[in-house]
Amino acid sequence: MTKIFTKLRALVDEALSDRDAVVDKAPVLEKAPLEQDLFDHRLLYIEEDMVNRMLRAALRNHWFFYAITFEFEPNNQIFLSIITKWGNVINVEFTLEDLWFDDYSSSFAIRLDTNNIDTGGFILNSILHLLGNWCLSLFGIFFNPIALGEKGSTVRFEKKGIIQFDLLPNTQVKKFIPMPERHIGSNGPVLLGNPRTSQSVLQLDYYAFHDPVDTFTVPDVPTRTSWLRSIDIAAVLLLPIGVWITFVILHHYLPTETLEFSFSTYFLISLGIFIISFLVMNIPRYLYMYFDSRKQWQSAFVHNNIKIQ
């Protein structure tokens, strides 16, 4: 029995050793390195209570504002309440249309209907509700952009009640946004956009790139209006001359015997018509050049805002 047991034990040990060898020779699966994300995406939440606390601290010694209070409502509706040092209360309701912050630009746009402004006075409210939107559009046509301070920030009044604020890249408004800590070694740009409001909360999409991103400036759109300007100048010069010559030629057919005018009087009248028509015809030209230059400025501004692709 002892010999049989010894032989069986040897067979078992041999079988176990062979199995261990097979197990050791089994290929080990190597873990494939995971591809690193290009950017870190998060959702930032800004509570209205935090914004109001910071505003109260910033406006504590202001000469005009006593208090400014924001209330965030769903569908990007925002209620603004302003109390002045003289006790006037101004309530404004507007819509947050767009918001964009990056390392190169800072801007946000709101849609304002002057019918949603309440100043607490019947006369001022009536004027604002009747002429407010029209005055904003007219003001934007002739005075856009309007400088905010001396550092380069501007505001623009656009169509349909849109008010666009173009701020400095390092604007103080960013202090109201709770920026998360960056990953170690991440030195790419940070993007903020896509604003959405809910009850008492403003939500923003936060994108932080880990690596630097190549940027470029889109060239200005070429505006080929030189031939239009030439035609415009020719019309401005030729039309008054044509009116003048036509009047001088046709004065022989006018009833001069009843008008009691001499040729010199006709000449002075025609010269006056020439000067007046020259001025009148130049007004559209100057207006055209003014609006054309504004369009060029606006297109260049839009292109300068597009930095990161």
Image (cartoon, helix red, strand yellow):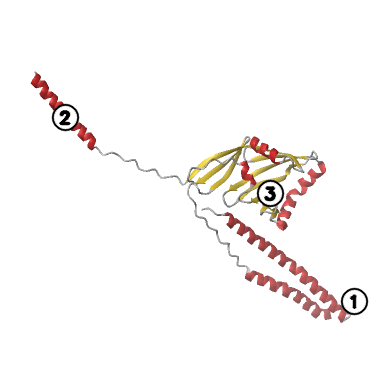
Task: Give the x, y percent position of residue 213.
Answer: 49, 52
Task: Give the x, y percent position of residue 66.
Answer: 75, 39
Task: Give the x, y percent position of residue 302.
Answer: 60, 56
Res. 48 mark: none
Quadrant showing the N terminus = top left
Task: Give the x, y percent position of residue 148.
Answer: 70, 52
* Image point (87%, 80%), residue name: 264
Q: Is residue 294 above or below residue 68?
A: below
Q: Which residue is mark 1?
A: 259
| C-alpha distance separating marks 1 and 3 | 55 Å
Amino acid at circle 1: Leu
**N-terminal-most mark, 1 or 3:** 3
Asked if residue 82 shows in the view, the reply is: no
Amino acid at circle 3: Gly
Closest to the observer, 158 or 11: 11
Determine the secondary structure under disc 3. helix
Q: Which residue is mark 2?
A: 15
| C-alpha distance separating marks 2 and 1 | 137 Å
Determine the secondary structure under disc 1. helix
Q: Residue furthest top?
A: 1
Determine the secondary structure under disc 2. helix
Q: Which residue is mark 3?
A: 161
Amino acid at circle 2: Ala
Query: In this rendering, would 74 be left or right of 40?
Result: right
Q: Residue furthest front?
A: 184
Please rate how many residues cluster around mark 2, counting C-alpha atoms within 10 Å: few if below 14, some from 14 to 19, many from 20. Answer: few
Q: Nearer the viewer, mark 2 or mark 1?
A: 2
* Image point (8%, 21%), residue name: 3
